[in-house]
Image (spheres, helix red, strand yellow):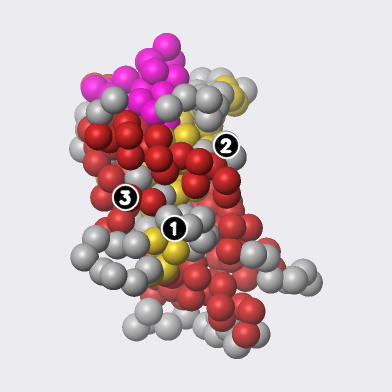
Amino acid sequence: MTDAAATYAAAGPIVRSAFPTAIPASDYIAWTVSALDEYGLTPERTLPILVTCRDEVLSDLKALVGGAWGLTFSGTSLGGAFTMGRTGFQAAWRHIPEAELPLRLAVFIFPHIGVDRDGTIGSIHRQGRANASQACGAIISMHQEFKSGATDLSFDSSDPEMSLLRQGVAPYLLGRPVPDLVALTEIVRDVAVMDLLKTGVANAGEVADLALFSGILINGPDETSWVLPDLANLRHHDDSELVTLVPPNSGGS
Ligand SMILES: [Zn+2]
């Protein structure tokens, strides 16, 4: 067993005690390549867009997507909100060579959450820091604001990404108790997906094949990265029917 395999074997039970269906991020990203191959979305002809948080702890995810899919259009924003909007999305697909029509895009939407060595959700040990720290710090900060009832939903130009993160989530919390951190992270994920579909799909329209992969990236013990899959599907430019893709289950490594 390699060192990496041993690290994942040790971290697996801790991560899966909190998230039973989590799979190693490397297995998940490798699966996305094989899942899209038969539909003609190969790494050579597909532009990947990664929507996730700015946190450097996500460098593993960024490297996995880049290693599998090539140069990646960045959709990073605090908390993993979809903030690139119509202009950002159009910029991404205008980078694809015109000779390659239909355009092929693979969008990955993955806000993140930590699981510490002792199984604590929302916490990680970062390299070179003795004490645990928060992940995702932006979502935890927003969670605390909502719980305190002192959330300012105005747009603060000195804090644009946090403003957009709050404004996107707030409507889904109306008339209900503030959810726990995992459920709030799921809302962040779902809002990002809805924003993509609203601003992205509406503008890419009939000239693009769009694959969407969403979920939560789990920062596990010893710098391991895991995926909790959610949506995986493909919108063909010439077919209104959505192709549902089925991610591997957690029976792997
Ligand atoms: Zn974060």
Residue assigned mark 2: 21
Give, as a single range, the part of the protein colored magenta.
Answer: 27-50
Q: Position of residue 54 (x, y in %)?
A: 32, 60
Q: Does residue 248 belong to the magenta stretch?
A: no
Q: Does residue 34 belong to the magenta stretch?
A: yes
User: In front of the other: label 1 or label 2?
Assistant: 1
**Residue 150 placement, left or right of 127:** right
Q: What residue sits 65% from the left and 85% below the top?
A: 149
Number of residues whose C-alpha sits closer than 10 Å to that of mark 2, classed few (under 14), some (14–19) or many (20 or more): some
> Measured along the vertical axis of the image, is residue 170 above or below residue 231?
below
Contact (CB < 8 A) between labels 1 and 3? no
> Measured along the vertical axis of the image, is residue 133 above or below residue 11?
below
Residue nearer the viewer, 67 or 201: 67
Q: Residue furthest top?
A: 38
Q: Position of residue 4 (x, y in %)?
A: 28, 35
Residue assigned mark 3: 223
Q: Position of residue 12 (x, y in %)?
A: 46, 39
Q: Quadrant of the N terminus?
A: top left
Residue assigned mark 1: 116
Residue 181 in which image quadrant: bottom right
Separation of marks 1 and 3 at Cα, in angstroms: 10 Å
Q: Which mark is residue 193?
A: none
Q: What residue sits 52% from the left and 60% below the top?
A: 121
Residue nearer the viewer, 245 or 199: 245
Which amino acid, mark 3? Glu
Q: Quadrant of the C terminus?
A: top left
SS class of the residue under badge 2? loop
SS class of the residue under badge 1? loop
- Which of the two labelled residues, at mark 1 and mark 3, occupies the earlier sequence position? 1
Separation of marks 2 and 3 at Cα, in angstroms: 19 Å
Q: What residue sits 38% from the left and 69% below the top?
A: 133
